[in-house]
Image (cartoon, grey):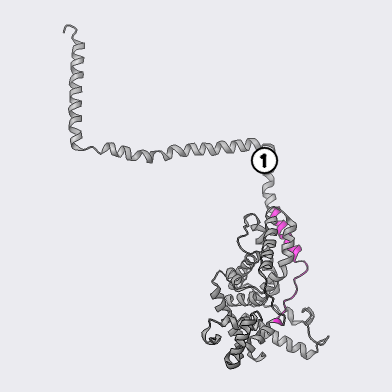
Amino acid sequence: MPERVKTDMGGATAALDYDAELMLRVKEGDGASFGLLLEKHRTPVVHFLYRMVQNHAVAEELAQEVFLRVYRSRSSYEPTAKFTTWLFRIATHLALNSLRDGKNERSQERLDKDPAEMPARQISDSRPSVEQRMVYQVRLEEVRQAVAALPEKQRAAVLMHKYEEMEYSQIARVLRCSESAVKSLLFRAYETLRAHLAHMA
Amino acid sequence: MKCPIETRENAELLLAYCTRELDAESTAILERHMEICPACREFSSGQRAIWEALDAWEAAPVTLDFDRRLYRRIDREVSWWQLLMRPLRPALVRQGLSIAAAACLVVMAGVLLQHPASAPPAAQPRSAQVEAFEPDQVEPALDAMHMLGEFSYRVRGDAADPKM
């Protein structure tokens, strides 16, 4: 299990300044800075959206919209919050709208059904056996279903906490709620996940 | 230490402990508590299992043409704007100054036309005040008018009869 590393304050400030500085350069018409922001945040945004809507094509489409909105808003951009807070606020908003509209309803892709399309897994054996693959697929499907069954806000909070390693305060700003509300959301979400996936322990 | 499961106030401590984010001092306190609390022990092992299960969920890589598609959309937006502005551009370039001057004149005319329209409401209270005479003010005014009438009649009479 990869260990989560706490961001030191200096690093966080530097990161804030760097992304915001890049965005301010985009505001001044520097297209290369937009390219740097895209390079840095493309994968986390697409992966977050994929885990939210559980459909790769829809996730990429939504991610395109996220970056398009960032580009469109360049002239009015003010670095009042951390860049990633703003970015994930847009992404969360679009994901929740997509889920509510039911755009990806009944079109759940099974891209990971074919093991050849999946990213390589770190397993002790160099080549996983057929049985190991099947066990992995079953576990993965259970995890996906358990996450999909979470209420939308809880799901977003878990994904930002687990995969984006965001602090409670940042998740709170993205979801526009209090820090204590985020703690409560996460506690309830993990409680539900434990109930669904208890047999995996 | 209050049990995190029972109080919920310390629930975040358990989550942080399971994700190994907790500092050494708090970890030691929580581990001492867990030795005597089966509920917290169960929570902890369950949470760690969830964490590992979620780790197994890897998202597929982003498609290679993601950037190209995005830039194409951006270009399309920019070219739409350019297409809309294209008919106006020669006029803007050639007659920029005259258009700017005309625009200034239009704005100024608008301001001037608006100004009188806003004046009457300010005058309203004054006219209302004039119309609101008290009865004791009317009587001397009528007397004065009567005297003026008499004076004018006599002056005209004198002017008509040169003998007098």
Residue located 36% across and 38% down the image:
B123
Check disc 1: other Cα within 10 Å, few if <14, some if 14-19, many if 20+.
some
- Residue B16 % position (x, y): 62, 80
Q: Amino acid at mark 1?
A: Leu
| Count of numbered circles in the view | 1
Residue positioned most to the front: B25
Q: Which residues are magenta?
A: B55-79
Q: Is residue A12 visible?
A: yes
Q: Nearer the viewer, residue B12 or A68?
A: B12
Q: Residue at x 61, y 90 (%)?
A: B41
Residue found at the very far top of the displayed protein: B163
- The image position of residue B164, as x and y in percent, is 16, 8
Per the image, label 1 sits on a secondary structure element best described as helix
Can you say whether B90 is above or below B20 in the image?
A: above
Q: Write the residue at 69% across / 62% down.
A: A19
Quarter containing the N terminus of chain B: bottom right
Which residue in the rendered view is the most extreme toward the right?
A126
Q: Is residue B138 shown above or below B19?
A: above
- Whether residue B58 appears in magenta in the rendering, the answer is yes
